[in-house]
Amino acid sequence: MARTATTTASFSLSSANLTSSPTNISASTTLTKAASKLGLTDTSGLGVKTTLSVDQYTLFYADQYTADKSSKVYLRNLSTIASEFFLVSIDDEPLGRLYAGDFSFFPWSATDGVRQVISLTLAATWATADTVTFDGQTITGAAAATTAAWVELLATTKYPNWTAAENGGASDTVVLFTAKDSNNLENFQLGSAEVATGSIVATITGNGTAVVAQVTEGVASANDIKITPSVATSMSLEHILINE
């Protein structure tokens, strides 16, 4: 049976003198999955983002969530200084400013970008003394005395910003690396790994080779949720994402 949850969002707006007659608006809804009566079941959890500069911060990466579903975002500026605000943007498109005490609640499509895919092709003779350095990880051969064993070793290593897998087939010579996010690896350099000109650096004691090639060019997501604080001193933003 599919897991479900019940989450209710409510909104009220009242004013005695905003218009020529009193204004009272009240709305309430139960948050459900796209085209469904089932409640949303996933959440980032209620958190607080504290900023210390006027740089732009990425609050939610679209690649990390299901695209084009019924996601909802809540934000609230916790500042008590009236002039302080967060500029809220979808990628580089401004939505508006949240001044001290202001909150917002809005839908989000979380459309993905295209994640970069690169290949590493091994050939000739690899040995246990060889090393490969990539994404902050240095892998040594240990028991990997053949090219096929090296491919398996590289494919099963955990990397901070990439996932790895064997390309398959009878040759067992290719490792595919896929970026975890579409927009955080713009500086990856291609090159012939055996001469250390790329972001993958191989140190080979024998006559082995390691050639890097781009399989899929990355295209940054244009749907990340970003915030830009108005001051460089400490500011805090309360946030939660409810999604499926």
Image (cartoon, rainbow, N blue to C red):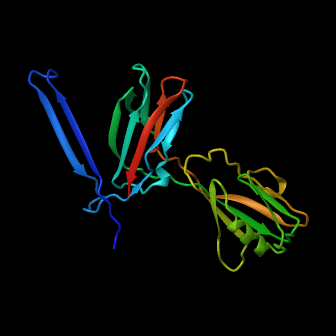
Specify whether residue 92 is in view: no
Where is residue 110? Give x, y as percent: 42, 50
Check the image and name the residue furthest to the front.
80
Q: Residue furthest bottom?
A: 170
Q: In which quadrant of the rendered image does the C terminus lie?
A: bottom left
Can you give x and y, in whole percent of width and height, for residue 161 in the image?
63, 53
Depth check, front residue: 150 or 206? 150
Quadrant of image for the N terminus: bottom left
Indicate left or right for 70 with 13 as reference. right
Spot occupied by residue 14 in the image (x, y as percentages of width and height): 18, 30
Of all residues, the one furthest to the right in this rendering is 205
Number of labels in the image equals 0
Q: Residue at x 51, y 23 (%)?
A: 231
Where residue 106 sits, quadrant-wise, is top left
Front-most of residues 93 and 48:
48
Using the rendered image of the protein, determine whether residue 203 is visible from the camera's viewpoint.
yes
Picture coordinates of residue 74, whole percent (x, y): 37, 42
Image-based side of 103 in relation to 166, left or right: left
Compared to residue 239, the image places residue 127 above or below, namely below
Q: Residue at x 33, y 41 (%)?
A: 105
Q: Residue at x 86, y 64 (%)?
A: 130
